[in-house]
Amino acid sequence: MKNKIFLYQIFFLLFIFFGCSKKKAEAIVITSSEDSLSTYFSLANDFSLSTDKRLVFTQKAFNIVINQENDSLNRVNLFKVANRYYNINNWKEFNKTVHLVLDKAESTKDTFHLTKAYTYLGDYYDSQSISDSAFMFYNKAEKMYTQPSDNIVLSKILISKANLQYKIGGFLGAQNSVFNVLRKIKEEKQVNNILYDAYNLLGLIYNELGEYDNAIIYSNKALAISDDETIPKEFQSRASSYNNIGFIYLNSQNYLLAKKYFEKGLYQKNLLKYKPALFAVLSDNLAYSKFKLNETDGLPDLFYQSLKLRASLKLTSGIFVSKIHLSEYFASKSDTVKAIQFSKQALLLATNTSVSRDVLVALKQLAIIEPEKASSYNKEYIRINEDLQKADRKMGDKFSRIEYETDQIKDENTDLETKNRNLLFGFSAFAVLGLFLYILKAQKTKNRELLFKQEQQKVNEEIYNLMISQQSTIETNRVQEKKRVAQELHDGVLGRMFGVRMNLDGLNKFNDEPAIKQRISYLSELKNIEQDIREISHDLNREKSELINNFVAIVDNLLEDQKKTFKPKLIATIDRTIKWELISNSVKINLYRIIQESLQNINKYAEANNIKVEIKKRDGDLFLTITDDGKGFDVRKSKKGIGLQNIQSRTTECNGTVDIQSKKGNGTIITIAVPFENKQILTQE
């Protein structure tokens, strides 16, 4: 056992001083004929070289590509550069290069490379544990994908989304995405690399849900195809599968089997060279399984070595796990100070990266090692855990799994096709029935609306007829008044003027003093006649005003009835300069009904002491404002009331707008703004 621990330590030293054993490889001298872009790309991807050397070659390749013309080949080469930065975990330059490709693709409207750039940016933000940004870019890539026939590329995008959903605890969404991928590639060939990722992720999901049997099944499916030639050896897929299976046994407390699989993973060839992050995971998991088996050899050094490697790779999620494991280890050794120190560091890291599941783990550990503060830790744990309940998700996950497994069984057993067809017919019939009921309900609603409009039209016609009747009465009175004025002018004013004219003609022959006095007397009579004519003219103007303001009289009658019948004090202000004869009867009818409807609502519900009705013109519009100091109401909850709907409908018919302001206890203000149909209404002759 001590030899194994020594071997792991040697692996770490090899990782740190890897370049020293590759002097021959690093001594490569590129001649002028070899000094080309393809050579730099090849050397930058040579894992036998040190990271620093590969970075140099990647930068040389970038310096060549950046000066190329912005065409499809240039964008392909930029993606190659980004891949080289990705392989050496240089996330800063990776992000910079991908954004450069994104700008170039957008400028040329290259949707293919634009989609690919979104996927790469999703990978970048995923590596930085910025989940919302990563998901956003993966989603953009999926939505922009324009080749539905190529299920393989789309499936890779969906796998990336599913992996991200898994990391943030969205197991239901992750599982649904994986099964969606499996359905898409069911008929495809040479997709073992995608199948590996899908099975692997399903194993992890079921492990988190505590369904260890399903987790082992899918993890073994992944292990069975881990050596497929379509999966690059640099991915270390077999080591990943061993780690995942070991982790499932670790969670199910089968520590001996867990330890066995972690050791198998660590023994994979070139693991530290190609996948140092996975090497760190396996090392930490091995140390933890040994800790659970009470094996002390190599501990806590193995924990520390894994933490150091993870820190050098900037793997925040791995750093969190290492610190929690170290906290558990020191707690078991009664070293409370170190246990608390590592737990609090883990909690701070989880909080900063907004990983709720990690926060729960850290709070649970702190509650154990700080019992005096357990109450506050547990309270926070319960608050966060309410958002992460698994019960509802498990049911949805089972439905997704059943749907996928049903598709598989259907391919193997033709007898189930009939049953599925019957289910489809039943669902279709149910859908048709639902559609029929929906149409029936919609038709009833339309009929009610039509009936309401017909009733409203009938009321409008009644009001219109009433106004016409009143207009006819006023017209009759007007004719009679004209006749009276004509008679008065003919019999009175004209007769008097004729007498004065005759007398003045007779006096023209005389110039003595009596004649002058007579003339003065007749001139005085002419002034009296002038005054009589003026009074008759005023009477005619009043009659015209009464005719014009017929609508005002109707509104006044309504307001007078309100004053006589109901308790609230009513104050009315109507702009007398408005030319109502130029406003259509439809507008006047609707304004009248709005006032009537508002007063009815106030009388029924408002319990107001004061009401104010104001009609005025302002800025080219006619404004009707109705104010009360009643108990008010919640406008948002009352918008569907028939009374408010009537007011809104009538205002719409006038091409106007309505504003209702009200709060409980603060009264109500209803403001109706109607545009003038003729701008001459604004002025009075």
Image: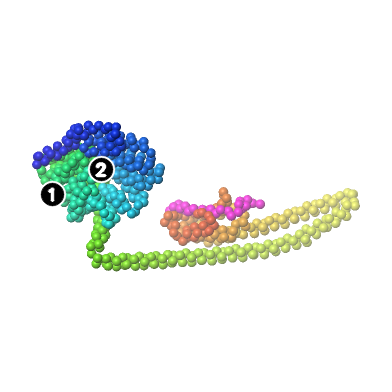
How is colour applied across the structure in the image? rainbow
Outermost residue to the front: 33
Decide: few, some or many residues near mark 2? Use Cα within 10 Å; few <14, some 14-19, many ≥20.
Answer: many
**Label 1 element class:** helix
Q: Is residue 375 visible?
A: no
Identify the residue under disc 1.
257
Decide which of 481, 369 is in the foreground and name it: 369
Q: Residue at x 82, y 53 (%)?
A: 522
Mark toward the start of the polypeptide (2 vs 1): 1
Residue 555 sits in which quadrant? bottom right
In the image, residue 622 lies in the stretch drawn in magenta: no
**Label 2 element class:** helix
Q: Position of residue 47 (x, y in %)?
A: 22, 39
Mark 1: which amino acid?
Leu
Mark 2: which amino acid?
Ala
Q: Is residue 425 visible?
A: yes
Q: Are marks 2 and 1 in contact (CB under 8 Å)?
A: no
Image quadrant holding the N terminus, namely top left
Location of residue 583 with respect to 458 vertically, above or below: above
Identify the residue under disc 2.
350
Residue 641 sits in which quadrant? bottom left
Which region shows up in magenta?
659-685
Q: Residue at x 53, y 61 (%)?
A: 565
Q: Position of residue 626 (x, y in %)?
A: 52, 54
Q: Left or right: 483 with respect to 574?
A: right
Q: Residue at x 34, y 66 (%)?
A: 428
How many dots with numbers? 2
Decide which of 504, 622 is in the foreground and name it: 622
* Distance CA(mark 2)–CA(mark 1): 30 Å
Q: Position of residue 605 (x, y in %)?
A: 46, 59
In the rendering, which numbered label is found on residue 1? none
